[in-house]
Amino acid sequence: MNIIPGFEFMETKHCVTGSMLHVFHFHHCPISEEMLLGLGDGVGFIYWQAKGDIPFLGGRANTARKDPQDCLEVLAAERCGVRAIRNLTASSKKAEKALLDHLNANKPLMIQVDMGLLPYFPFYEKYHFGYHLVAAAGYDPQTGEVALADRDAQPYPVQLAQVNAARGSTFKPFPPQNAWMEYDFSGFHQPDAASLTLAMRKCAGEMLNPPIRNLGIKGIHTACQRILAWPEMMDDITIAASSLNIALYIRADAGTGGGLFRWMYADFLRECAQRLSKPALKTIADDMQTAGDLWEGTADQFDQIHNAAELRERSAQITALFGEVAAAEQSAWSGLSAVIT
């Protein structure tokens, strides 16, 4: 397998920040994965159900839903002096050329893919999620394999044709649109106080004052109401799949770092406390850690739900848990807003 000289495969927590970390590290730009998450306004809450699909409960924010340049992978880079462009194309040939041009020049490239079309995932061709990012770190023209860096400290060899298919997937949600990131690291610097404060203010503001009721802390209450209504809307098979999906996207296995990204964000706040000499942020970080612990407990409940009867039996526990989570999040984000103001 051909690997770009000097590229290091690292264990990471989240696909977006982990892929960024691989590329930043290769270019000798020291920064933590947690810092990238926080710096890119990367944490929030959403409960969303597309027509004909199972519900999605997520803890990420700033995911380029409207503007291709308005996303964590652009904003976090720009806030530390790195010029960033998120490229989209309908042409598989153009996307492949950009990939091979970078790899042949010994430059890793961060690409967006449908994880359900990557053969090393256990749910290959059974489940689709197109907002998965990896770092391409080498190409062997003799075998036709691209070396991908994912969240494990090892390379994954994938045939170029399969990489192209994963990049051009049209499966929902989040079709990847052959997206790739280009960075110019010549102006890299550590984030300054203004950027860190702005990033914290943005996340706190959107959690406390969301524009619609399925986002932010309002969204946590909305999620509870809609989940309790599942038995009137879904059959047992769909309830089981939806419960599994919610538990999965809370936990570290799905690339959240654990606790619906709250544990990662707590570590970001601890870094900010040190960088900004604001010890009060350590207390907020502990509150955020507690919110993550409660989310993990919520995942434990959904692990036990396989049908409408089991959901109804646990309705009181679910209501109480979501109430505790919402209260913990209100306390953490309100506290953060007060400290940075």
Image: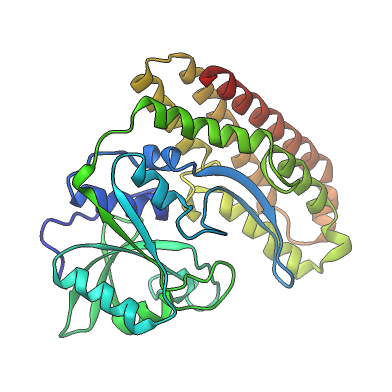
Asked where in the image residue 305 lies, by quadrant, the reply is: bottom right
**At 15% across and 85% down in the image, what residue appears?**
142
In this view, the residue farthest toward the left is 5
Question: What x and y, as percent, mark residue 253?
Answer: 48, 53
Question: What x and y, as percent, mark residue 270?
Answer: 41, 25
Question: What x and y, as percent, mark residue 236?
Answer: 79, 67
Q: Is residue 10 visible?
A: no
Q: Is residue 10 above or below residue 326?
A: below
Q: Is residue 283 above or below residue 226?
A: above
In this view, the residue farthest toward the right is 232
Asked where in the image residue 157 lies, by quadrant, the reply is: bottom left
Relative side of 283 to 187, left or right: right
**At 80% across and 55% down in the image, what residue appears?**
310
Quadrant the C terminus occupies: top right
Instruction: Give the colouring mode of the picture.
Output: rainbow
Relative side of 10 to 242, left or right: left
> Which of the pair 317/148 is nearer the observer?
148
**At 85% across and 55% down in the image, what residue appears?**
229
Q: How many marks?
A: 0
Q: Is residue 249 above or below residue 269?
A: below
Q: Is residue 30 above or below residue 235?
A: above
Relative side of 300 to 42, left or right: right
Question: What x and y, as percent, mark residue 231?
Answer: 85, 60
Q: Is residue 173 visible?
A: yes
> Which of the pair 65/15 is nearer the observer?
65
Quadrant the N terminus occupies: bottom left
